[in-house]
Image: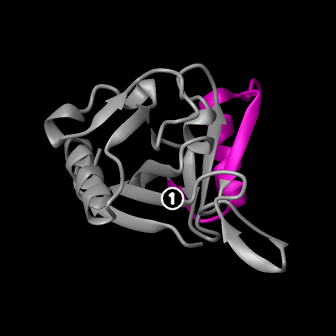
Amino acid sequence: MSSSVAVVGSMEEVPAAVAAWLEESRLSKQGVVWPALDGLDWTGAGLALESRPVREDDPVGVTGCICAIAETGTLMCASAPDTPSATSLLPETHVAVVPASRIVPGMEEAWAMARAQWGSRLPRAINFISGPSRTGDIEMSIVLGAHGPYRVHIVVVSEI
């Protein structure tokens, strides 16, 4: 799905892994992060990530997810006050933090996990992200970033 992946052992290692990937990719180290991830030491890793509403000029957005679906390589994200959808949709680069315990085999297990978290009151929007935004509408050529991020990087956390 054109996403890149890194694996770390703990949540404390996430900022350094994100910083290393951004450096290696020669990308901006500034942007926005979900409130749920604001407690990580982004500044200590050399990143200028703020927990606030995303702006159109934010180059990087860091999010979590409900789960990741192994069958399709898809991230399942919910829109809520502490998990705003715009953080994964507006910046050119989306970085998703995924606990290994939240990787499920297929769509059925993903919906079961969402229902276990919210019961019958699911969030107003559920987004499925399968790599960078792409379209083939322009002269039948695949173009990345047409309707969302140009790149998606996933950091899998093996232990929580």
Residue 124 is one of the magenta-drawn residues: yes
Q: Which quadrant of the rendered structure holds the C terminus?
A: top left
The location of residue 6, given as percent across then percent down, is: 33, 64
Q: Amino acid at mark 1?
A: Val
Mark 1 crowdedness (10 Å alpha carbons): few <14, some 14-19, many ≥20: many
Q: With respect to residue 139, does 56 lie above or below?
A: above
The location of residue 10, given as percent across then percent down, is: 23, 48
Q: Which quadrant of the rendered structure holds the N terminus?
A: bottom right
Residue at coordinates 55% horizontally, 28% vertically from top-left?
55
Q: With respect to residue 39, does 93 lie above or below?
A: below
Q: With respect to residue 131, does 82 lie above or below?
A: above
**Which residue has dot 1 on it?**
152
The location of residue 140, given as percent across then percent down, is: 83, 80
Q: Is residue 41 visible?
A: no
The location of residue 36, given as percent across then percent down, is: 42, 27
Q: Which residues are magenta?
A: 103-128
35 horizontally vs 21: left or right? right
Residue 14 is one of the magenta-drawn residues: no
Q: Residue furthest bottom?
A: 140
